[in-house]
Amino acid sequence: MNAPFAIEPPSLRNAALSDANQWRGAMVDLFARGEMLIAKALRRRQGEGKIPLHTSERAQQLAAHLGEDDAGYGALETFMALYRRRTSLIHGLSNLIVEEGGWVLAVEWDDGAGPRRDFFTEAESETDRLHLKSVVDQLRGALAS
């Protein structure tokens, strides 16, 4: 008969890593939803032909269709202002720092002009996610027509 064993709770670092990865995945998902809204709205306005590959180019073309007075224009502008964060979250090399106050995700990436470093904190993570979700919801509502 085998002796019983105790299952140790996950270490603080493993829990922080899991939390940071879950947050990062949620953010990437929200950015993908925004990207799809932009692609669909552009296709509705210019037909089923080929559209640009990159979301920034799609957003520029969609903005030209909308015009500055359209509610979708403002929502699109707000989404694209946050879009730089998507690049670092997807393409960046991350290093998790666990401190007494929570985790910090240091993300190193290159935007073509040179190396960049972004920092995302556990303390701000839920606020960041809720803000992006709100922006994507606004984009959805504004581009629905």
Image (cartoon, helix red, strand yellow):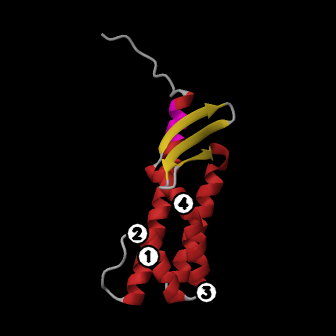
Quadrant in which residue 49 is drawn? bottom left
Whether residues under marks 4 and 3 lie with C-beta atoms below 8 angstroms apart, the answer is no
Vertical relation: 92 (above or below) 137: above
Separation of disc 2 and disc 4 at Cα?
13 Å
Separation of disc 3 and disc 1 at Cα?
16 Å
Residue 1 pos. (x, y %): 30, 10
Q: What's drawn in magenta, residue-wise?
A: 14-19
Whether residues under marks 2 and 1 lie with C-beta atoms below 8 angstroms apart, the answer is yes
Q: Which residue is mark 4?
A: 84
Nearest to N terminus: mark 2 or mark 3: 2
Mark 1 residue element: helix
Separation of disc 4 and disc 3 at Cα?
22 Å
Q: Is residue 15 magenta?
A: yes
Mark 3 residue element: loop
Q: Is residue 140 magenta?
A: no
Q: In the drawing, does residue 65 fall left or right of residue 50?
A: right
Q: Which residue is mark 2?
A: 54
Nearest to N terminus: mark 4 or mark 3: 3
Vertical relation: 93 (above or below) 132: above
Mark 4 residue element: helix
Residue 48 pos. (x, y %): 31, 85
What amino acid is found at the position of numbered circle 4 in the picture? Arg
Asked whether residue 37 appears in the rendered view, the answer is no
Q: Which residue is mark 3?
A: 68
Residue 115 pos. (x, y %): 52, 47
Separation of disc 2 and disc 1 at Cα?
6 Å
